Amino acid sequence: MNKICNCIIVDDEPMAREILESHLQKVDAVHVVASCKNAVEAFNQINLNKIDLIFLDINMPEISGLSFAKSINKNIKVIFTTAYREYAIDGFNLQVVDYLLKPISFERLLQAVNKYLGENNVVEVSNTPEITPEKNDFIFVRADRKMVKIDFSEINYVESLSDYVKINLIDKVIVTRETISNIEAKLPKNIFMRVHRSYIIAITKIDSFTNEFIEVGSKAIPISRSYKKDVLLRLENV
């Protein structure tokens, strides 16, 4: 299939731009014309090229994504990409195509692209070839105001504490505001296992277990009653 939708990425975070561009390279229906670090660069691209779609961060210096979206030609469609859920109402009031919360998975991005294609009659969604994402051995999470790459092989266990999550690696701990359920959805189930409302463990990092606890290094992780049957059954058949 030929490239049929010209888009630009606008985000002040280099890592966020790289992740989006990497995802979009797998989608035949989309051509990334440029990756811009601010609204000024994006304005220049719109003046130089025919742009159909913008993947637009909201929280940017000088000119915010919301202000930028209000100023452009309404024929150019927008998909907001942001780490801040509270902007959702403002975003949808602008009648944007979709609103993606970072970190953005390939599957969620593809859903938004297919929504754009369907709404704008660019191509029938049913005729869009099935795209199977590559199976990566890592994820990205937001920590310290940037997207941090975490290799699956480095994870010992994940622990939920109040309104944040600690990802305990072999040599350090990464703290993120994501929920443990969101983290669980990104981890391969053949390698990781939820054993408690507050814990996910890497199966290969288990040193020992009882009916009540799993030991990972010096950490004794409880097995909750609601997970116990499935956890013990799985461990006994590893």
Image: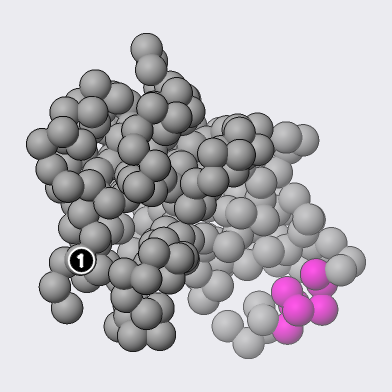
Residue 78 spot, x, y in % from top left = 41, 45
Closer to us: 49 or 33: 49
Magenta stretch holds residue 232: yes
Task: Give the residue at mark 1.
Answer: 4
Is residue 15 toward the left or the right of residue 139 in the image?
left
The answer to which image quadrant residue 203 occupies is: bottom right
Q: Residue at x 61, y 54 (%)?
A: 182
Q: Residue at x 59, y 43 (%)?
A: 92
| Residue at the farthest top position | 62
Say whether residue 173 is visible: no
- Classify 85 as above or below 65: below
Residue type at mark 1?
A: Ile
Helix, strand or loop: magenta stretch? helix
Residue 8 spot, x, y in % from top left = 24, 44
- Classify 71 as above or below 152: above
Magenta stretch holds residue 72: no
Is residue 162 toward the left or the right of residue 181 in the image?
right
| Residue at the farthest front position | 74
Judging from the image, what secondary structure is the residue with disc 1 in?
A: loop
Magenta stretch in the rendered image: 227-233
Q: Classify mark 1: residues with Cα within 10 Å, few (<14), some (14-19) or many (20+).
A: some
Residue 90 spot, x, y in % from top left = 61, 33
Closer to us: 125 or 214: 125
Q: Residue at x 17, y 47 (%)?
A: 50
Is residue 63 toward the left or the right of residue 216 in the image?
left
Closer to us: 135 or 76: 76
Residue 30 spot, x, y in % from top left = 24, 62
Closer to us: 81 or 67: 67
